[in-house]
Amino acid sequence: HVFLSCLLKYIHSVTAERFNNNNNNNSNNNNNNQQQQKDSDSSDSSKSSPTTSSSQGINDHEKELLSKYQQMMHAILKDKQMQLATLYALQSFYHGLNFPKGALLRWFHMLYDLSIVDDDVFFIWKEEINDKVPGKGQALFQVNTWLNWLAEPDSEDEEE
């Protein structure tokens, strides 16, 4: 559990640092772009917003870092209790950060995509009442739509 908390803090700090650097660069670029736009009186609607590109960059960077540790996490998280502890560690960590928008959802999705946490463990976490870890209501609010999607049967399963 301690290792997972440390890994999570490391990945979060690296991505937060990158996000802050991107925001500073985007802010400088936006100021330059606004000045250029005033000078040229033209607009380009095909540009993506800095927020969108920054958020996507952070998501990609988080997934890249998590992928580096994927094999190690598979070895550590073989049993469902450890996987469940990981979800609670995420809940606790993001509760301490006041649940940044979409952060817990990104992590749940990455852990699912990389097959680090089994599907049924997400539902165990959802249904389990654990007053020792704060923020369950806020956490559920952030990931409930995704959990509902996960609960839906695959279209391949329906055809069989």
Image (cartoon, grey):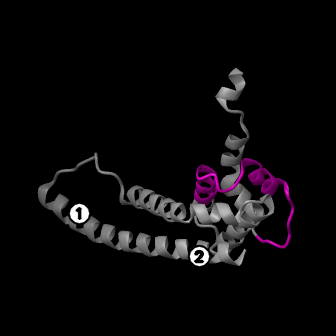
* Residue at figure coordinates x 43%, y 69% from the top left: 19
Could you tell me which residue is drawn at 79 percent across and 71 percent down?
A: 133
Relative horizontal placement of residue 32, taking residue 85 as reference (left or right): left
Q: Amino acid at mark 2?
A: Lys
As shown in the figure, which amino acid type bears the numbered disc 1? Gln
Q: Earlier in the sequence, mark 2 or mark 1?
A: 2
Residue 72 lies, with reference to residue 41, above or below; the image says below
Task: Give the extent of the magenta segment.
Answer: 105-134
- Left or right side of 61 for 70: right
Q: Helix or strand or loop: what does disc 2 sit on?
A: helix
Residue 10 in the image, given as x and y percentages of width and height: 55, 76
Q: Is residue 91 inside the magenta stretch?
A: no
Looking at the image, which residue sits at the far top?
159
Q: Residue at x 59, y 61 (%)?
A: 71
Query: For the residues carrying marks 2 and 1, which lies nearer the camera in this image?
Result: 2
Q: Which residue is mark 2?
A: 9
Q: Which is the main secondary structure of the residues drawn in magenta?
A: helix
- Which residue position holds label 1? 34
Which numbered circle lies on residue 108?
none
| Circle 2 crowding by C-alpha within 10 Å: few under 14, some 14–19, many from 20 | some
Which of the 4 image quarters holds residue 132?
A: bottom right
Residue 160's place in the image compared with 87, above or below, is above
* Residue nearer the viewer, 65 or 134: 65
